[in-house]
């Protein structure tokens, strides 16, 4: 069990420092992934940015994910889910545009005018506070692959072993210290799992940025 997200990030940072990571970039999934990623970025002296993902729901069932929009990449769809319903990817064009707008709003809220880090040719460490089903992280990784990073490392404090096995094929390395079976929930493995709000996220990203960093 972790004390909080910061302590979980410190555990991950210790494991990541053993690896040889060329020009690492840390990408956190907001909001909970940011306090985990901050100590990692500090330990590796690496830039911290966000990887923003928005789910696209099925018509009439918005909780069921037809796909997802990842910032800066083509949307990812579960075509095996669409085909039996007679749906095409093009049927979601309007939803994709709405989700891109939501992503732009969140980047502005969390990062202001800060320039997005270019990950092409670099080692990218994707961080969240834990994984349950893996649907959001999977979409993020598929979108990230299209940005041509040199390598991808997935670093999470806790996840079910079957989800880790599934995601291993999408990355070069997985760091996940806790893979409990049975898996109940991410929050069950933290003493303090309070909600992270938008102001917290913006403050931590500003802290990671440090003084003297240029803006757009």
Image (spheres, grey):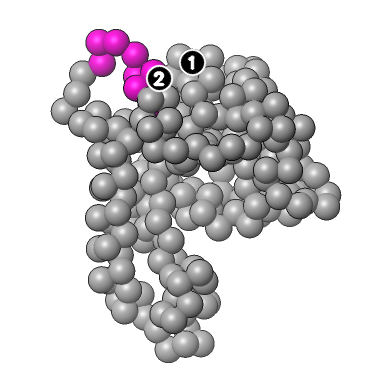
Which residue of the protein is positioned furthest toward the right in this rendering?
A: 181
Q: Which one is in front, 126 or 101?
A: 101
**In x, y percent, where is residue 40?**
54, 22
Q: Is residue 145 above or below residue 135?
A: above
Residue found 20% across the figure and 31% down from its top? 113
For label 2, the SS is helix
| The N terminus lies in quadrant | top right
Q: Which mark is residue 42?
A: 1
Count of numbered labels shown in the rendering:
2
Residue for point 40% across, 56% down: 54
Measured as percent of width and height from the top left, residue 162 is found at: 73, 54
| 208 inside magenta stretch | yes
- Mark pair 2, 1: CA separation: 7 Å
Asked if residue 166 shows in the view, the reply is yes
Whether residues under marks 2 and 1 lie with C-beta atoms below 8 angstroms apart, the answer is: yes
Q: Residues within 10 Å of mark 1 (few under 14, many from 20)?
A: some
Q: Which residue is mark 2?
A: 208
Q: Which numbered disc, 2 or 1, marks the residue that appears first in the sequence?
A: 1
Q: Residue visible at 42% across and 25% down?
A: 204
Residue that lies at the very extreme toward the left in this rendered image: 216
Which quadrant holds residue 176? top right
Image coords of residue 103 (percent x, y) = 31, 50
Q: Quadrant of the C terminus?
A: top left
Question: Which secondary structure lies at badge 1?
Answer: helix
**Disc number at residue 15?**
none
Confirm whether the magenta stretch covers residue 215. Answer: no
- Classify 196 as above or below 37: below
Look at the image and give the residue range highlighted in magenta.
Answer: 205-213
């Amino acid at each position: 069990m972790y004390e909080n997200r910061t302590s979980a990030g410190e555990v991950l940072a210790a494991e990541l420092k053993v690896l040889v990571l060329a020009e690492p970039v840390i990408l956190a999934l907001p909001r909970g992934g940011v306090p985990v990623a901050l100590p990692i970025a500090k330990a590796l002296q690496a830039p911290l940015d966000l990887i923003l993902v928005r789910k696209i729901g099925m018509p009439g069932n918005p909780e069921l994910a037809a796909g997802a929009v990842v910032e800066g990449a083509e949307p990812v769809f579960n075509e095996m889910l669409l085909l039996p319903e007679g749906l095409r990817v093009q049927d979601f064009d309007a939803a994709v545009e709405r989700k891109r707008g939501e992503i732009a709003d969140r980047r502005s809220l969390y990062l202001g005018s800060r320039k997005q880090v270019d990950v092409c040719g670099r080692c990218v460490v994707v961080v969240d506070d834990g994984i349950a089903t893996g649907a959001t992280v999977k979409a993020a990784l598929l979108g990230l692959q299209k940005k041509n990073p040199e390598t991808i490392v997935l670093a999470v404090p806790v996840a079910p072993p079957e989800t880790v096995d599934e995601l291993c094929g999408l990355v070069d390395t997985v760091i996940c210290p806790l893979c409990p079976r049975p898996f109940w929930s991410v929050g069950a493995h933290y003493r303090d799992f309070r909600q992270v709000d938008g102001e917290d996220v913006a403050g931590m990203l500003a802290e990671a940025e440090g003084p003297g960093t240029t803006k757009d």
